[in-house]
Structure formats: structure tokens, C-alpha cells
Image: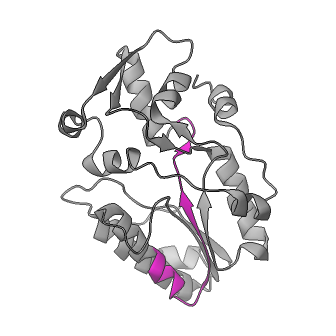
């Protein structure tokens, strides 16, 4: 296990020599006084690039966010877009995945819903009709491995999402299937105030960010797992 605060230490770089690919998973979706989007999402990515060049790593695989674009007004999305541009302009081989919610047992959305479920009530901000397109964490792992091995993924930006677009209301009901849970809809103003989700996280949740995954499905040999199956497989529903 290698730990580092800024990816610049000589000791870290020596341990990363003789590798061909770096998978960049580091990022934050919620700012704190000590951890800003600029510091973590942008500047750390610059350090990742320097580390790759100093150690001879030739390719970066980067997990960005579904909805990121040059026209993003969200400070989170804007920081991810800047990170993407740093990677694209680095001269290194790259694959950038703009990921929807990656669902497993320990992701932020799963932990939030599980915590609410234990209290007996899941909060649905607003109408709950906005959609998400979650993808199973095991599918993501397989696709990343495929990306490491296959040149067809080189220098591409790909949306990384599951096969089904589902409303948040339907998702939480499926998530809590067979559990004694109540659902409480609250208006968005109250949702921003109650602290269950950060303002950035709530912006993303209600943003209705979905994708046509046909391009991804043409490239990958991984069969995307249905939301029903991966919730059942992970014992989340």
C-alpha cells in the first residue's frame, strides 16, 4: 500500500516506476475549508500528470462525472472539466470516463440511503422524478481492466453509465424493497437546508444527468448489469 498527500514525494515516485497505466480515482464532490475542488480535483490531477511523466507511466485512466462539459456552471463539474483538460493536453495516452453513480456497498449514495433506511424514512428531495443511470461497481472494475489492456479505448472520453434510466423515486423504492421504510418528499428549498446532501451533491442528483450508452456498449465486452440485479447481488434490496 502506497500513501501520499500530493503525489510528489520521491519515495512514491520510485515505487511507481515500471508501471504502464495509472488509474486516477481521486476526487471530491463536497468542499471543506481544507479540501477545495481546485486543490483536490484540479491541482492533484496536475500532480498525477507530473508523477506519470517522472515515472514513465504512459497512460491515465480518469474517472470524471456524467454531466461534465465546458459549459458547466456547477463548481464541481467545472473543476472536473479543468482536470479533464489537463489530462487531454498532457501528451499522455488517456481514457476519461464521465461516470454516473457507481453503486456498490460503500459508495456515498448507498451509504446515505442505508443510513436513512435504518432510521425508517428515506427523504426524496423535490418530485423524485429526475433520473439517474447507476452503474454497478463490478462492471466499472471490469471496464477499467479492459481499458488498460485494449488500445481501442485510447484518447477517448466516454460516458460511463448503466443500461437503465430510472427516476430517483423508483430507485429508492427498489433500493429499499422488502424493507419497512417510509418515503417523505420535501421541497427543494428544505432539501438544500437539511444537510442530508451537500448543495453540489443535490445539484447533481436533481440534474437529470443521463446518457446514451450505445457507444460504450460497442467498445466494451462487458455486459452491463441491470439495476435490479446489482442491487440484489449486493444485497442492497
Residue 230 in the magenta stretch? The answer is no
Residue 225 can be seen in this image = yes
162 vs 26, left or right, is right
Residue 186 occupies quadrant: top left
Q: Residue at x 57, y 26 (%)?
A: 236
Residue 166 occupies quadrant: top right
Q: Quadrant of the N terminus?
A: bottom right
Pick the residue in front: 82 or 92.
82
Q: Residue at x 55, y 87 (%)?
A: 53
Residue 8 can be seen in this image = no
What is the image's colouring?
Answer: one colour
Q: Position of residue 91 (x, y in %)?
A: 57, 90
Q: Residue at x 55, y 81 (%)?
A: 52
161 vs 101, left or right, is right
User: Which stretch is magenta?
Assistant: 84-105
Q: Is residue 77 above or below residue 198?
A: below
Q: Residue at x 77, y 76 (%)?
A: 151
Q: Is residue 12 above or below residue 208?
A: below
Q: Position of residue 45 (x, y in %)?
A: 43, 74
Q: Position of residue 48 (x, y in %)?
A: 47, 76
Residue 87 in the magenta stretch? The answer is yes
15 vs 222, left or right, is left
Amino acid at each position: 500500500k502506497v500513501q501520499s498527500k500530493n503525489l510528489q514525494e520521491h519515495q512514491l515516485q520510485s515505487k511507481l516506476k515500471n508501471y504502464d497505466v495509472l488509474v486516477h480515482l481521486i476526487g471530491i464532490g463536497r468542499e471543506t475549508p481544507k479540501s477545495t475542488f481546485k486543490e483536490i480535483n484540479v491541482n492533484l490531477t496536475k500532480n498525477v500528470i507530473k508523477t506519470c511523466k517522472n515515472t514513465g507511466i504512459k497512460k491515465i485512466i480518469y474517472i470524471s462525472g456524467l454531466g461534465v462539459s465546458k459549459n458547466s456552471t456547477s463548481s464541481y463539474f467545472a473543476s472536473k472539466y479543468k482536470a479533464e483538460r489537463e489530462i487531454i493536453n498532457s501528451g499522455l495516452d488517456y481514457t476519461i470516463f464521465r461516470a454516473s453513480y457507481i453503486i456498490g456497498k460503500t459508495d456515498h449514495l448507498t451509504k446515505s440511503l442505508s443510513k436513512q433506511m435504518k432510521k425508517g424514512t428515506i427523504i426524496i428531495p423535490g418530485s423524485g422524478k429526475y433520473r439517474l443511470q447507476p452503474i454497478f461497481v463490478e462492471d466499472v472494475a471490469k471496464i477499467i481492466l479492459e481499458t488498460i489492456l485494449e488500445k481501442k479505448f485510447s484518447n477517448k472520453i466516454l460516458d460511463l453509465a448503466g443500461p437503465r434510466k430510472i427516476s430517483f423515486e423508483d430507485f429508492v423504492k427498489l433500493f429499499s424493497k422488502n424493507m419497512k421504510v417510509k418515503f417523505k418528499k420535501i421541497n427543494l428549498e428544505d432539501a438544500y437546508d437539511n444537510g442530508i446532501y451537500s448543495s453540489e451533491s443535490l445539484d447533481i442528483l436533481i440534474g437529470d444527468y443521463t446518457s446514451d450508452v450505445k457507444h460504450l456498449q460497442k467498445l466494451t465486452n462487458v455486459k452491463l448489469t441491470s439495476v435490479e440485479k446489482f442491487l440484489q447481488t449486493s444485497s442492497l434490496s
